Image: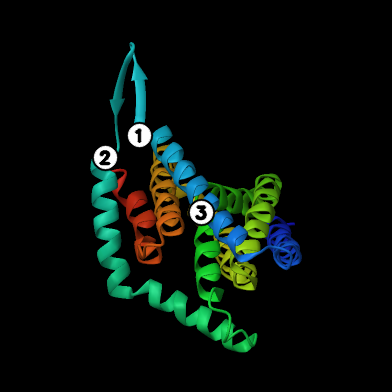
Amino acid sequence: MPGLGTLINGLAVITGGLLGLVFRRGLPQRFQDTLMQALGLSSIFIGISGSLEKMLQIQNGFVSVQGTLLAVLSLAAGALLGDWINLEHRFEQLGLWLKKKTGSEKDSRFMQGFLTASLTICIGAMAIVGALQDGLSADPSLLITKAVLDCLIIMIFTSAFGKGAVFAVIPLVFFQGSITILAQFIAPLLTAPMFDNLSMIGSMLIFCVGINLMFNTKIRVANLLPALLIAILMTPLL
């Protein structure tokens, strides 16, 4: 059944969030802070490894780099488009609405948990390829694998940030579900190089999420999301 993978993925996120809330009650603040730094460090290295995997090539014993121009142009154009649309603000509006509706006005980490968790589990080639596979052949296997990973990720995020991270299930279901529904139209347009560049830019955005976590900075990662689409569109040109 098309959509089963996203349904399982969403349930896994909720399960991970509930487990994280249980564990969080027994964690002192200093442990939560250390856990957040560990998440940041992990995200940084996941982002670095994912982007370098697509950028570095070894031929005849020599290392060459590809995709740098596409990365620069995609991120720059994506940042301009994202700032113009103001995606970060729209994400924040959704987070504030959820915060109010769930009676979490006093939860200082609700917004950070929601934004960080949403970006982490929605960005990446696995979400897109898995949703396409689910929509085209009703094969949820890749999204089931992702569901296991997301369950662990959200459990850790919820342990560090609280229940805001659980609501990342909303953009996850919307994003992956939309791709599954439109799979018949999207798949014929995508090539292997497009997927590679999508994965490269997605890994760079995960790196930015890690920087925000590790160093308590404010890279507006949501405003960089259009870079994913621009990377796909620019692939045939570069």
* Residue 69 pos. (x, y %): 23, 42
In the displayed structure, 66 sits above or below 178; it is above
Task: Please state which of residues 191 and 113 is positioned toward the viewer in this rendering.
Answer: 113
Position of 44 compared to 35: left or right? left
| Residue 74 x %, y % | 28, 52
Residue 42 locus on image (x, y percent): 52, 46
- The residue that mark 3 highlights is 37
In terms of image quadrants, where is residue 33?
A: bottom right
Which label was assigned to residue 68? 2
Task: Mark 3 or mark 1: name the one nearer the start of the chain.
Answer: 3
Quarter of the picture holding the C terminus:
top left
Residue linked to disc 1 = 55
Q: Quadrant of the N terminus?
A: bottom right
Helix or strand or loop: what does disc 3 sit on?
A: helix
Residue depicted at 51% across the width and 75% down the height: 111
Residue type, mark 1 in image: Met
Q: In front of the other: label 3 or label 1?
A: 3
- Identified at 45% across, 52% down, the residue is 206
Q: Examine the rendered structure and indicate whether residue 163 appears above or below residue 120.
A: below
Q: How far is mark 1 from mark 2, CA to CA?
A: 7 Å
Whether residues under marks 1 and 2 lie with C-beta atoms below 8 angstroms apart, the answer is yes
Where 4 falls versus 108 (above or below)?
above
